[in-house]
Image: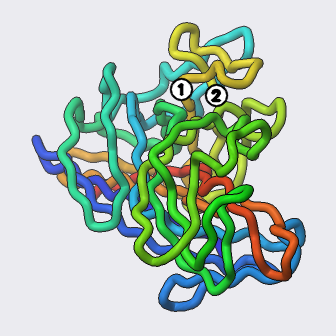
Amino acid sequence: MMNWLKIIATLTLLSFFSNANAEGYCNDGPGASEDSDGVITFTGAESAMGDCAFAPDEYTIKIYKMALCTSVPTRPTTTDTYDVSSCVDVIVSPEGQDVNLAAGSEMTLSGVTRPANGSYSYGYLLMANTFGIKAKKQFTNTMHTFLDGATGNYCWTLDSSAYDSQSNGAGWENPSPLAECGGAGGTAGTYNATLDQFDVGEYTAGPISVTGGTLSADLITDANGLVVTATQTADRLFGVQTFTTPVIVSTDSSLFTVSFGVNQASSMWMTDEGAANQYDVYAIGSGPFSTFMTVE
């Protein structure tokens, strides 16, 4: 089952504010389950488990642009930048706006423009490719801080930063600087995870099916708008969504709602510890996103 973390933003004339609601699920296949209190149980080899996704306590992103489009934007390549000439800007923020998707939070965003009247079947989002993750999770298992750190039934993020391409534990100091496990008294910090590849050597993704349509994403640089060709070089994420149901803006429209969804908002990055149903944790990672837009 997919896990969704959403920010819902409402535009009424001059105001733009957001609420977030977090729900976590970890029951997608063998070896991983989450009870009604949010406590996770792992069983068996880590490599044989199904996906285990859950909502972090906080999830911070930086948005530069959000727009609605009448025809599908042209995605960037390694030689040509993207074409968004069919799009109408909804948010423009040259310096970027930090949005915290913590459950129940509200914030005011600037640089918001009412979309022009029309039918929009597509949307695009330009954002930073660094995600601030703050999470603390309880387990029935004994969890170990990778590799020889503290153990316990809780794990949490630490104040730290890393690229996804380097967050697999290789070459780190011992214990992991990104996450820690121990008792109930542990305090979560913010792990700034920079998405610099979707998989080894892959810098584009999609289109993939998401709730509300299909999503494509590209890792680019702000300097030239081109898809990167190496890790630790991207500084922007360019995402295009095709909506299942077009967004219709008319003269009578007065309410504009944007939901920003994070599929598999966070998950444990871990390896088998060596004892049955015990695991070494080196990070609590991030996941992809999608957007939903409606007008009333």
Is the residue 161 above or below the residue 44 in the image? above
Q: Position of residue 273 (x, y in %)?
A: 81, 68
Circle 2 Cα neighbour tier, 10 Å, few/some/many (<14 / 14–19 / ≥20): many
Residue at the bottom extreme?
36
Q: Earlier in the sequence, mark 1 or mark 2?
A: 2
Q: Position of residue 6 (x, y in %)?
A: 42, 61
Is the residue 246 above or below the residue 38 in the image? above
Marks 1 and 2 sit apart, C-alpha to C-alpha, by 6 Å
Q: Residue at x 68, y 61 (%)?
A: 281
Q: Residue at x 80, y 62 (%)?
A: 271
Residues 146 and 256: in front is 146
Q: Secondary structure at mark 2?
A: strand
Residue for badge 2: 219
Task: Determine whether label 1 and label 2 are within 8 Å by CB.
Answer: yes
Q: Position of residue 109 (x, y in %)?
A: 22, 40
Residues 177 and 247: in front is 177
Q: In the shown orientation, is residue 108 left or right of residue 194?
A: left
Q: Residue at x 33, y 66 (%)?
A: 103
**Count of picture labels:** 2
> Visible in this render: residue 269?
no
Residue for badge 1: 236
Circle 1 Cα neighbour tier, 10 Å, few/some/many (<14 / 14–19 / ≥20): many
- Quarter placement of the C terminus: bottom left
Q: Secondary structure at mark 1?
A: strand
Q: In the shown orientation, is residue 288 left or right of residue 204?
A: left
Q: Quadrant of residue 268?
A: bottom right
- Quarter placement of the N terminus: bottom right
Q: Quadrant of residue 13?
A: top left
Residue at the left extreme?
14
Q: Amino acid at mark 2?
A: Leu
